[in-house]
Image: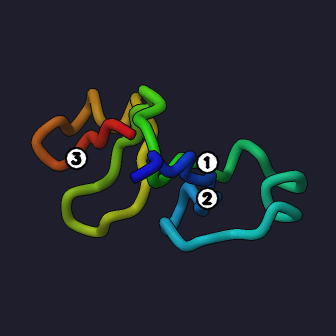
Amino acid sequence: MAKSAGRSVNRSASNGKFVSKAAVAKSPGKTVTQHVGGSKTGQTVTRSASSGKFVTKAAAKRNPGGTVTEQH
């Protein structure tokens, strides 16, 4: 079997929902691009443990027990 190259998906940084490329172009600071499938990219994202929403690195440092870091 050939390895899949994967693809990139865009999510809102505030609520974790998928967003369009137009939304990323309009507000790049409010979105997170994740590579899914295929090989790992080395990208790290941090989410709130209670809500699943993306959080900043600063928020994760303030509340390390309330966040989950994912390696993509």
Residue 11 is left or right of residue 22, and the answer is left
Q: Describe the element under mark 3 as helix, strand or loop.
A: strand
Q: Describe the element under mark 1 as helix, strand or loop.
A: strand
What residue does disc 2 label? 9
Q: Of the numbered discs in the image, which one, if any, rests on residue 33?
A: 1
User: Few, some or many C-alpha atoms within 10 Å of disc 2 (few <14, some 14-19, many ≥20)?
Assistant: some
What residue does disc 3 label? 67
Q: Residue at x 22, y 46 (%)?
A: 68
Give the spatial CA distance, label 1 vs label 3. 19 Å
Q: Residue at x 20, y 65 (%)?
A: 50
Give the spatial CA distance, label 1 vs label 2. 6 Å
Above or below — where is 70 with respect to 54? Answer: above
Q: Amino acid at mark 1?
A: Thr
How many numbered marks have been drawn onto this rendered protein structure?
3
User: Few, some or many C-alpha atoms within 10 Å of disc 1 (few <14, some 14-19, many ≥20)?
Assistant: some
Q: Amino acid at mark 3?
A: Thr
Q: Are marks 1 and 3 in contact (CB under 8 Å)?
A: no
Give the spatial CA distance, label 3 vs label 2. 21 Å
**Residue 32: percent from left, percent from top:** 59, 48
Q: Are marks 1 and 2 in contact (CB under 8 Å)?
A: yes
Which badge, 1 or 3, is on the more N-terminal residue?
1
| Towards the viewer: 62 or 32 | 32
| Towards the viewer: 28 or 1 | 1
Q: Describe the element under mark 2 as helix, strand or loop.
A: strand
Which badge, 1 or 2, is on the more N-terminal residue?
2
Which badge, 3 or 2, is on the more N-terminal residue?
2
Above or below — where is 50 with respect to 8? Answer: below
Residue 39 is left or right of residue 70, and the answer is right
